[in-house]
Image (spheres, rainbow, N blue to C red):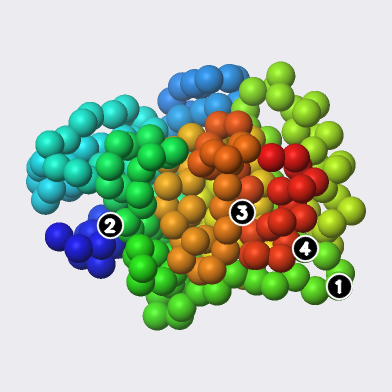
Amino acid sequence: MDAAALADLALDIAREAGRLARTRREEGVAIAATKSALADIVTEADREVEALIRARLAAERPDDGFLGEESGAERGTSDITWVVDPIDGTVNYAYGMPHYAVSIAAVSGDPTPPTWTALAGVVHNPAVDETFHAIRGGGAWLGEHRLSASSVGEAGGLVATGFGYDPKHHAEDLARVAAVMPLLRDLRRAGAASLDLAYVAAGRLDGYFERGLHPWDHAAGGLLVAEAGGLITGAPGGAPGREMTIAAGPELFERLVATIGV
Ligand code: IPD
Ligand code: CA
């Protein structure tokens, strides 16, 4: 199966998963548990939506591996692993803010960010019915519209960040924001990393940086940025991930990397 066919499957499953997430949201959402920190929540809908995605992938691609935020990892026998966040932006979702997404990526090779190769990625926001997708070598798209990362003007970049859930990192996160602020027109903290990356691909943001991301937060969005002509990196010489993720169009990227110091 080629990357375009993997993207088609991911698009179909993400839309079905999005319909379920939206229906559950309309019915009312209750927090099911807290995870890594008090602020890190999961709802029944996160679990149910991941179960739907996992079951569809198992039915249609039984040899592939799976890595999901809510139900963990399982190695496959093919070269492909599906990296899934059923609801990215769970806090927005729980509070009724229409800024959350189903994120699904197909990666080949060892399914860890430093070594995987993302082949296809979908970030779908069911609340506003927007679907971003990327195909390795085939571009980044919002529906039929091909995406291209921005070039920044004189007023500086519009850049998003996030703070993760662990309060022990908040002081260093805020110090980083203070260091970056002089480069910016303004800062956003929208609450869904996959959408932050999709927005960089779409030129709706000029850049994005955050410490603490998990593979499912950036697998699909990272491919969107790269296929839109943007750049994405992690800590020194590394892949995007827990220590740092920085994404931007080419001009701002160098300045962000130099200021954040990776
Ligand atoms: C979170 C969101 C948030 C980011 C956190 C992520 P979740 O994912 O993407 O924007 O700041 O680091 O964990 O918990 O909503 O799936
Ligand atoms: Ca999530």
Determine which residue is flagged by label 1: 154
Element assignment for label 1: loop
Q: Pick the residue in front: 196 or 43.
A: 196
**Mark nearer the N terminus (1 vs 3):** 1
Numbered tag placed on residue 247 in the rendering: 3
Query: What percent of the width, then of the height, locates residue 65?
Result: 21, 37
The answer to the question of whether label 1 and label 3 lie on touching residues, with beta carbons closer than 8 A, is no
Label 1 and label 4: CA atoms lie apart by 9 Å
Query: What percent of the width, then of the height, locates residue 185?
Result: 84, 62
Total residue callouts:
4
**Mark nearer the N terminus (4 vs 3):** 4
Task: Judge depth for marks 2 and 4 and give the one in front.
Answer: 4
Determine which residue is flagged by label 2: 10
Residues packed near mark 4 inside 10 Å, few (<14), some (14 to 19) or many (20 plus)? many
Compared with 148, 70 (above or below) is above
**Mark nearer the N terminus (1 vs 2):** 2
The answer to the question of whether label 2 and label 4 lie on touching residues, with beta carbons closer than 8 A, is no
Numbered tag placed on residue 157 in the rendering: 4
